[in-house]
Image (tube, rainbow, N blue to C red):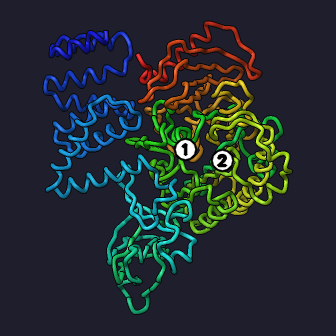
Amino acid sequence: MNKEIEKTLMNGDYESAYRLIQEYRSQKYDYDTFSYLSYYYTGIGKYDKAYDVSCEAVDINPFSIDSCYNLASAAWQLEKYDEAYKYLLRVHYLQEYYKNYVVDNDLVKTQIEELEAIAANDEELSEKYAAIKELEVYSERNPYKSANTPIVGQFMHGCDGRINYVASTSRWYESYYNKDCNRDAYRAKCELFPLAKVSNVYKADISEKSLMPVCINYRMDGENGAIADAADISKTTYMDPAYLKYSYIPVDKPTTFVAASEAVFAKPIPLNNSNGRRKRLVMSIFADSFNYRIIKEKGLDKLMPETAAFFEKGIVFDNFYSGSEWTLPSIATYWTGKHSSKHMNLDEKYLIDFMKDEKVLAEYFHDEGYVTAKIGGNDAVTPVSGYNRGIDRFLYQYISQGYTAKDVVTDVIEHMRTFAGDDQYLWVDFVDLHDISGGFMRSIGVQAQMPLECRMFDNDVKTTVKQTYSENRKYIFEQELREFDFHLGRLFKYIEDNYSDDEIVISLFSDHGAAFMVDNGEPFVSWQRMNVPMMIRGTGGIRGVCDEVVESADYAAMMCALAGIKYDYTGTDANLPKVLGGTREREYALSQSLFVGDLYSGALHGRDFHYYFKSAKPVQPEFRIDISKAEDYIADDRGEIIDDDDRRLKYRERLLSEIKHLIKK
């Protein structure tokens, strides 16, 4: 029917086309009908309707070139020039990136120029364009994983409209003696706070003891500045020649700050807001690339005795599964409660605002009054992707330059001590285990356990995600686990020394397993890769090993439930496990690999079965999936085929319903 609808639209017979579209939609789901409806509404001059249907289409698949162009066209007709500009820029980039020219590219360039001409004499519109262009550049080239982008000293716009000023921390030489040196995220540890004001006067309406972050010398070309309390300048004038670095000033009453020149004032952070009703400490400990399989084989107490002892007073989930095989889409699921085929944060070469109109993990805690922080060096969990949403303090350095577990733990404890009077939520990420996949040199402690024969490459490596099984890397992984556990032990000791069990919710989990610990010949989203740790302490007295099937889409709901926060399940794939008070158990957990140029792989992991689905053709640009000649089967943990066609067809239908908007007709 597609051809008939398209022909009718081209002939301008819009009413007949509309009837055909509605008839077709009543029979089956086809994402392309969004474009048909947009063409129809545009054809009859109902641009508001075309705009609405195009917005819905882009929300479902932000990589659809046709939908983005339709949205830009409708927005232009409605004089929403900033939106038209945003989506034409996206169309231009996606077409060049995928070499998939759905719309005439010269036309797109001309339209972008015409929109820029409209803004030439409109200061407000020009400012909107500038912010859009900045985000577009970030989308294409993440400055938090670039050695050539000096982000320290920059104001960074977020997708949610918030602005953060990026300063360096713990860098004295650069701050005092050579401010041009080491301003990228590889060599500088970056610290971000939400911006309050850039001015030489700032009135802080503070009613409780708080910490006031301020960068006195925020401009590269500025002179040494000073700051004072306007109420008594002679006794409070503070001069500091440090450049591009925050000072932290404690205040306990309304205060007007005056500076010798413009300074960057961040939003004040409470220092004593604990109210006795919230948990005092909620923490998400994210360890990249951690297969639970090795724990099942060798025992948590043997590999990670500190971790085993800490979580012995909580729940360890044996059947917890990640939704994706790499970090970018996987962690997005943890934050949104949505499967990767729904949140669509799938391509590191073009980052989208996948959190748009969503309330995400950190915001639940921030909105409840927690002081929030994100600390770590994972390059897929950066402000460019929106992970500063709901965060009061963001501390980051690119992992490969040394922001390893020993330093991250030190910074986490320092942060906890600083804000000890607050109820705190922290997201902490560790990438030490992941770097074994990349073959990077390990610490002196780990290398002391690595004879030459175990350092030999004994597997085929294409990428960190695509490599064959390796006994040598598995051995190194075990040594790294022990070192990681040692550093976690310092953190766990601090927690146990300063908090009681009823005051905390602490979780440890991973985004996916390492490829080199998956047996050769296993499906790409095998349980050996997708079954990852999930350990939680602070579970209200519930302890032990739980075999309930749980997945990463459940995580935010779980943490909120344990902290007594109401979670909004609307539009999510989340389910609260029965062991934590939910009403139903999952039959299976969904895992997917959805990557342009690779075969689509999906799996439904149950207690005693694994359903696997693999396309015969690679995923196409715009993440469209051709399912013709796809293969699927059910197997047990040993890989033995379970011959049950009725179940196989049932699971096939359920998996395809997850990707129906991406299926190529």
Residue visible at 57% across and 47% down in the picture: 563
In the rendered image, is residue 390 in sight? Answer: no
Asked if residue 643 lies left or right of residue 157, the reply is: right
- Residue reaching furthest to the bottom: 234
Q: Secondary structure at mark 1?
A: helix
Q: Quadrant of the C terminus?
A: top left
Q: Secondary structure at mark 2?
A: strand
Q: Who is closer to the viewer here, 625 or 94?
A: 94
Position above or below: 120 against 629:
below
Q: Amino acid at mark 1?
A: Cys
Q: Are marks 2 and 1 in contact (CB under 8 Å)?
A: no
Position above or below: 444 against 630:
below
Position above or below: 211 against 141:
below
Q: Position of residue 588 (x, y in %)?
A: 62, 24
Q: Amino acid at mark 2?
A: Ala
Asked if residue 163 lies left or right of residue 396, the reply is: left
The mark found on residue 490 in the picture is: none
Q: Position of residue 116 (x, y in %)?
A: 20, 49
Q: Who is closer to the viewer here, 391 or 424?
A: 391
Q: Quadrant of the N terminus?
A: top left
Please identify the quarter of the rendering in which residue 471 is found: top right
The mark found on residue 560 in the picture is: 1
Q: CA distance from mark 2 to mark 1?
A: 20 Å
Q: Nearer the viewer, mark 2 or mark 1?
A: 2
Position above or below: 77 against 218:
above
Q: Which residue is mark 2?
A: 287
Mark 2 or mark 1, earlier in chain: 2
Q: Position of residue 633 (x, y in %)?
A: 64, 14
